[in-house]
Amino acid sequence: PIIEVIFGMGSGTGGGKYASDQEGSGGGIGLGVKARPSAFIVIKEEEVELLSLHKPGSLEKLIEKFPEIMEKFPRKPGKREGKEEKKE
Protein backbone atom coordinates (compact mmCIF):
# COMPACT_ATOMS: atom_id res chain seq x y z
CA PRO A 1 0.00 0.00 0.00
CA ILE A 2 0.94 3.63 -0.50
CA ILE A 3 0.10 5.59 2.63
CA GLU A 4 -0.63 9.31 2.88
CA VAL A 5 0.61 10.88 6.14
CA ILE A 6 -0.51 14.35 7.25
CA PHE A 7 0.99 16.26 10.19
CA GLY A 8 -0.51 19.33 11.84
CA MET A 9 0.51 21.62 14.67
CA GLY A 10 -1.00 24.66 16.34
CA SER A 11 -0.05 26.81 19.31
CA GLY A 12 -1.23 29.93 21.06
CA THR A 13 -0.59 32.11 24.06
CA GLY A 14 -2.48 34.88 25.72
CA GLY A 15 -2.42 37.21 28.64
CA GLY A 16 -4.71 39.70 30.23
CA LYS A 17 -5.41 41.99 33.12
CA TYR A 18 -8.55 41.82 35.22
CA ALA A 19 -10.41 44.85 36.54
CA SER A 20 -9.07 44.07 40.02
CA ASP A 21 -5.46 44.62 38.83
CA GLN A 22 -4.78 40.87 38.66
CA GLU A 23 -2.86 39.53 35.68
CA GLY A 24 -3.03 36.17 34.00
CA SER A 25 -1.45 34.36 31.11
CA GLY A 26 -1.74 31.01 29.45
CA GLY A 27 -0.56 28.97 26.53
CA GLY A 28 -1.28 25.78 24.71
CA ILE A 29 -0.05 23.56 21.91
CA GLY A 30 -1.66 20.81 19.87
CA LEU A 31 -0.24 18.19 17.52
CA GLY A 32 -1.99 15.80 15.18
CA VAL A 33 -1.11 13.02 12.76
CA LYS A 34 -3.36 11.33 10.20
CA ALA A 35 -2.34 8.27 8.17
CA ARG A 36 -4.52 6.57 5.57
CA PRO A 37 -3.97 4.30 2.57
CA SER A 38 -4.28 6.19 -0.70
CA ALA A 39 -3.33 3.55 -3.28
CA PHE A 40 -2.17 -0.03 -3.78
CA ILE A 41 0.46 -1.34 -6.18
CA VAL A 42 -0.65 -4.66 -7.69
CA ILE A 43 2.00 -6.80 -9.44
CA LYS A 44 0.82 -9.74 -11.56
CA GLU A 45 3.48 -11.47 -13.63
CA GLU A 46 4.90 -8.69 -15.86
CA GLU A 47 1.99 -6.30 -15.25
CA VAL A 48 2.18 -3.53 -12.63
CA GLU A 49 -0.96 -1.55 -11.79
CA LEU A 50 -1.57 1.35 -9.42
CA LEU A 51 -5.05 1.30 -7.86
CA SER A 52 -5.96 4.64 -6.33
CA LEU A 53 -8.54 4.53 -3.55
CA HIS A 54 -9.67 8.08 -4.32
CA LYS A 55 -11.04 7.35 -7.81
CA PRO A 56 -14.59 5.98 -8.22
CA GLY A 57 -14.58 2.23 -8.81
CA SER A 58 -11.06 1.67 -7.47
CA LEU A 59 -12.20 -0.16 -4.36
CA GLU A 60 -14.24 -2.57 -6.49
CA LYS A 61 -11.17 -3.25 -8.68
CA LEU A 62 -9.10 -3.94 -5.58
CA ILE A 63 -11.70 -6.39 -4.25
CA GLU A 64 -11.73 -8.19 -7.62
CA LYS A 65 -7.93 -8.58 -7.52
CA PHE A 66 -7.81 -9.68 -3.86
CA PRO A 67 -7.68 -13.46 -4.59
CA GLU A 68 -4.78 -12.90 -7.01
CA ILE A 69 -2.95 -10.81 -4.41
CA MET A 70 -3.41 -13.47 -1.71
CA GLU A 71 -1.93 -16.15 -4.00
CA LYS A 72 1.39 -14.28 -3.84
CA PHE A 73 1.75 -14.97 -0.11
CA PRO A 74 3.09 -18.42 0.84
CA ARG A 75 1.00 -20.54 3.16
CA LYS A 76 2.49 -21.87 6.38
CA PRO A 77 3.33 -25.58 6.26
CA GLY A 78 1.32 -27.83 8.55
CA LYS A 79 -1.84 -25.76 8.33
CA ARG A 80 -4.98 -26.97 6.62
CA GLU A 81 -7.35 -24.53 5.02
CA GLY A 82 -9.81 -23.23 7.59
CA LYS A 83 -8.59 -25.49 10.44
CA GLU A 84 -5.45 -25.87 12.49
CA GLU A 85 -3.98 -29.30 13.13
CA LYS A 86 -4.39 -30.46 16.72
CA LYS A 87 -1.35 -31.88 18.50
CA GLU A 88 -1.85 -34.60 21.07
Image (cartoon, helix red, strand yellow):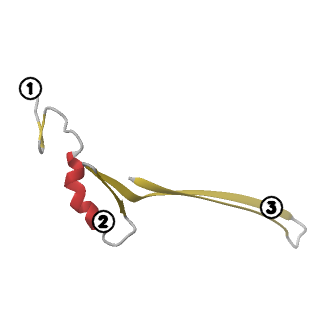
Q: Nearer the viewer, residue 19 or 44?
A: 44
Kind of residue indicated by mark 3? Ser
Farthest-out residue, right: 21
- The residue sitting at 70% across, 59% down in the picture is 28
Judge the density around disc 2: few (<14), some (14-19), many (≥20) Cα neighbours within 10 Å.
some
Label 2, secondary structure: give it: helix
Farthest-out residue, top: 88
Q: CA distance from mark 3 to mark 1?
A: 70 Å
Label 3, secondary structure: give it: strand
Judge the density around disc 3: few (<14), some (14-19), many (≥20) Cα neighbours within 10 Å.
few
From the viewer's perspective, tell me whether residue 86 is left or right of residue 42. Answer: left
Looking at the image, residue 20 lies above or below residue 43:
below
Question: Where residue 23 sits: x, y (%)?
Answer: 86, 64
- Residue denoted by label 2: 59
- Residue denoted by label 1: 88
From the viewer's perspective, tell me whether residue 62 is left or right of residue 88. Answer: right
Residue 64 in which image quadrant: bottom left
Question: Where residue 70 sits: x, y (%)?
Answer: 22, 49
Judge the density around disc 1: few (<14), some (14-19), many (≥20) Cα neighbours within 10 Å.
few
Kind of residue indicated by mark 1? Glu
From the viewer's perspective, tell me whether residue 53 is left or right of residue 19. Answer: left
Looking at the image, residue 73 lies above or below residue 12:
above
- The residue sitting at 12% across, 45% down in the picture is 82
Kind of residue indicated by mark 2? Leu
Looking at the image, residue 53 lies above or below residue 72:
below
- Residue denoted by label 3: 25
